[in-house]
Amino acid sequence: MTPILQYGIYLPDPFSSTVHRASLEKMGDFDVCINGQWYGYNIGTNANQGLSILANDEIYGMPSPGLWSISQTLDYQWIVKEGDPTTQHHTGIGGLCPLIINSLLYGEKNVYTKSDLKDIILYGEPKPEHKKYLLQRSSKKFHDLNLASRSGQVGFGIKSNGNVVIFLEEDKTAKMSYYAFRDLFEGEGCIHAFACDGSDSVFLYLNKKWKVRAALHKDNTQTSGIGFRIDD
């Protein structure tokens, strides 16, 4: 996994140019790149929601403790945690919306397998004694995204063997809720899955060719992508 970040000024060098140049330079040797973190307009990578850790231990972005991160070790193990990644591992990216964590589904509120539990918590951290009954864990970010669903969506999941699954729905044809989007990853057997910046920020770059492009105004301002290598 390789975080791809915008360097230097934007126009006339949009983020799509950064991605293509990084691909040609074998930056992390990635074959596919999707857009990554949510960001603030026109104020650079330090406004990315969540930290990005590069292979040289450089750190970009703002801490985002309420969201999730994923890191990769030098021996290709995945490390998933709430909060931001650290330089302890090879690369990492934070600011991700949880869809599935350790095979537990995430959604707008806590859902339990037992209906007779006393004083349940619907939003936020469940009571310790109720966690074993969780069917779905609440996420504020998921709630906010689902309110604006039927717009572009992109995310990635990790299977038990470490393989990566990517799903994307273009903004102009988007119809799915975030529940339906999440369930795509569950159907593929993902034990972890995350949503990235959606709507018209969505892009897909595969084998040095653009399959889906972000809207022009997003391409000129976005600063974060995530590259993955395809192994035969």
Image (cartoon, helix red, strand yellow):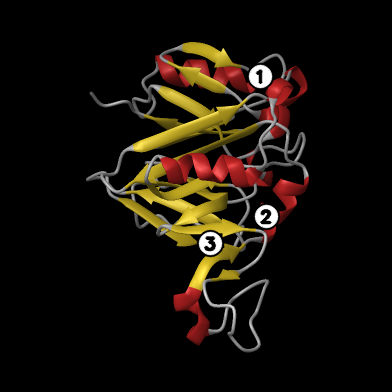
Point out the tag, 2 or 1, that comes first from the N-terminus. 1
What amino acid does circle 2 point to? Lys
Q: Position of residue 130 (x, y in %)?
A: 52, 82
Q: Position of residue 149 (x, y in %)?
A: 73, 40
Q: Nearer the viewer, residue 98 or 31?
A: 98
Single out the mark in the foreground, 2 or 3.
2
- In the image, residue 61 sits, relative to residue 13, either above or below, namely below
What amino acid does circle 1 point to? Pro
Q: Residue furthest top?
A: 209
Q: Residues within 10 Å of mark 2 (few under 14, many from 20)?
A: some
For residue 195, say whether it is visible.
no
What amino acid does circle 3 point to? Gly
Q: What is the number of the mark on residue 14?
A: 1
Q: Nearer the viewer, residue 155 or 68?
A: 155
Tell me the quadrant of the picture where the N terminus can be found.
Answer: top left
Q: Nearer the viewer, residue 41 or 193?
A: 193
- Residue shown at 49%/16% (left/top)? 21
Q: Nearer the viewer, residue 218 or 86?
A: 218
Q: What is the number of the mark on residue 141?
A: 2
Single out the mark in the foreground, 1 or 3.
3
Q: Position of residue 71 (x, y in %)?
A: 39, 50
Point out the tag, 2 or 3, that comes first from the N-terminus. 3
Q: Residue furthest bottom?
A: 118
What secondary structure is marked by label 3?
A: loop
- Residue shown at 35%/57% (left/top)? 88
How far apart are labels 2 and 1 at the CA level? Answer: 27 Å
How far apart are labels 2 and 3 at the CA level? Answer: 13 Å
Residue that mark 3 sits on? 83
Q: Residues within 10 Å of mark 1 (few under 14, many from 20)?
A: many
Q: Is residue 71 left or right of residue 47?
A: left
For residue 69, say whether it is visible.
yes
